[in-house]
């Protein structure tokens, strides 16, 4: 199994909240404009995400799925996963333990 040549991975770091959500949304827009077949968000270095961050992820996922692409999250730590569960969006996203698994998935 080989990984795709174009990785289309967005690594995020630290706290994803209202202060950074607009910049992340802008970055997603640039990436999505190229219509990658797969877009993976690396959350392995994220310590917290608020509702604005979740909204940006949901919007990006919907945009990618609209043209038939796949949107995945990778590397959620337990504290971040619990935020997804509390917000009841944990079942909405494709999630993988790490980026390579997300890139290799069908």
Image (cartoon, helix red, strand yellow):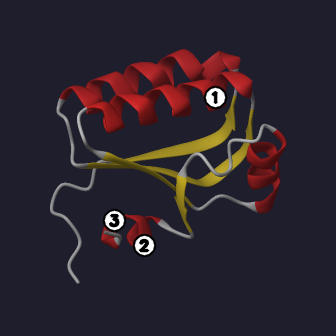
Marker disc for residue 72: none
Determine which of the numbered discs, if any, sits on residue 103 in the image: 3
**Residue annotated with mark 2:** 101
In the picture, the quarter occupied by the C terminus is bottom left
The part of the image, by quadrant, that contains residue 17 is top right
SS at mark 1? Answer: helix
The residue closer to the viewer here, 44 or 59, is 59
Left or right: residue 8 versus residue 72 is: left
> Looking at the picture, how far across and down is residue 56, in whole percent?
54, 26
- The residue identified by callout 1 is 53
Residue 53 at x, y percent in the picture:
64, 28
Secondary structure of residue under mark 2: helix
Q: Within 10 angstroms of label 3, few (less than 14), some, or many (20 or more) residues?
A: many
Furthest residue in direction bottom, as rendered:
1
- Between 71 and 5, the residue placed more toward the observer is 71
- Give the image location of residue 23, x and y in percent: 49, 19
Query: Residue at 72% across / 60% down in the picture?
Result: 77
Gap between marks 3 and 1 measured at Cα:
22 Å
Q: How far apart are marks 1 and 2 (CA)?
A: 23 Å
The N terminus sits in image quarter: bottom left
């Amino acid at each position: 199994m080989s990984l795709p040549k174009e990785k289309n991975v967005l690594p995020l770091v630290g706290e994803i909240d209202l202060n950074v959500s607009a910049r992340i949304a802008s970055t997603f827009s640039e990436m999505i404009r190229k219509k990658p077949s797969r877009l993976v968000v690396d959350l392995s270095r994220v310590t917290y995400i608020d509702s604005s961050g979740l909204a940006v992820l949901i919007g990006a996922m919907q945009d990618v799925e609209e043209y038939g692409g796949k949107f995945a999250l990778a590397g959620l730590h337990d504290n971040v996963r619990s935020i997804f569960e509390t917000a009841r969006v944990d079942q909405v996203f494709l999630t993988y333990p790490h980026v390579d698994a997300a890139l290799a998935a069908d």
